[in-house]
Amino acid sequence: MRAVVITRHGGPEVLEVRDVPEPVGGDGRLVVEVAAAGVNFRDVYEREGAGSYDTPTPLVAGVEGAGVVRAGAGDSPPGARVAWWQAPGSYAEVVALDPAAAVPIPDGVTDEQAAAVLLQGMTAHYLSSDAYAVRPGDWVLVHSAAGGVGLLLTQMVRRAGGRAIATTSGGEKAELARGAGAEEVLGYDEVPERVRAMTGGEGVAAVYDGVGKATFDASLASLRPRGTLVVYGSSSGMPDPVPIPRLNEGSFFVTRPTLHHYAATREELLERAGAVFGMVADGSLSVRIGGRYPLAEARLAHEDLEARRTTGKLLLLPR
């Protein structure tokens, strides 16, 4: 079968499409024909060998996708449609995964939608309902609001009764953020001054920041007293260490959560994924697929993602 292999850590050029042995069943794992694989920043970190993603090479890239079960296991029989968000080797025509990681795809949700929304949708869900639970009337700031998580998160903030201020680089991205429910869209250089002005000088209840180093100081300065800064990603690099006394300026809370801790059990995974898929199926959550690439163009997908030339979710289509 064909798969995208990381031969050594580095830039997008290290991604190579190769023929590799196809996984087979019989060892307790599911074997799934991949209909679509999700492209995520965590794949970039793994390709670069950054921090905890310094995985030995060679390896098949990717962890997220959706498809049809070929060899069943657990409660997923052959022919079932499933999605997953933590199965190494997902940039491939066929993948093997732990049955406990597979989520059934309900009627009303396509394979592409499932691959596009599972990881980022569950991330948006735990951010808005757990890391900081949005309350009706809350002002919150959503950075990179036209990205995969940002568009979903903005919709969920609005669904919870919150009022979202979005940041984007402008143009089409600003219009997408408004379409997702943002009350105002700002440039990154307008934070925190415009945020303070919009909230009567008080600041926002929470900032959802997937950018990291480049936005951290402005995010902290945008909070109201007892506000919460949720740093869930670091696309611009990790923020510098924060002196504890600085938090005393507003009795601020700062958290660096990860989805693994908010989908820690099979029951929690199914509950959170079910909530996201339910919103997609009933039309209350719009999933934007910003680009579809064949496996042979995985390098281009990474280049587009890192250059922020895209909106929504990027998918690799093996077939």
Image (spheres, rainbow, N blue to C red):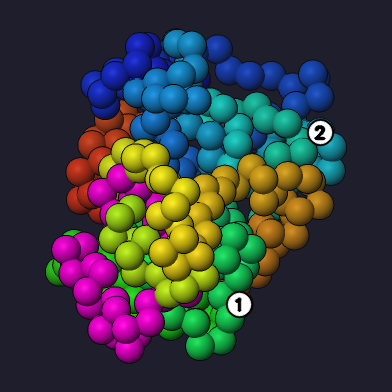
Please indicate, yes or no, whether residue 278 appears anywhere in the rendered image: yes
Camera-side residue: 5 or 174?
174
The percent position of residue 93, horizontal first and vertical second, equals 50, 29
- What numbered label is drawn on residue 73? 2
The percent position of residue 83, horizontal first and vertical second, equals 62, 46
Please indicate, yes or no, whether residue 176 appears anywhere in the rendered image: no
Residue name at image x 81 percent, y 33 percent: 73
Q: Which residue is mark 1?
A: 282
Camera-side residue: 265 or 85?
265
Q: Secondary structure at mark 1?
A: loop
Q: Residues within 10 Å of mark 2 (few under 14, many from 20)?
A: many
Q: Where on the picture, by quarter, is residue 101? A: top right
Residue name at image x 65 percent, y 27 percent: 96
Tell me the CA gap for discs 2 and 1: 29 Å
Residue range in magenta is 187-215
In this image, 45 relative to 118: left or right?
left
Vertical relation: 50 (above or below) 243 = above
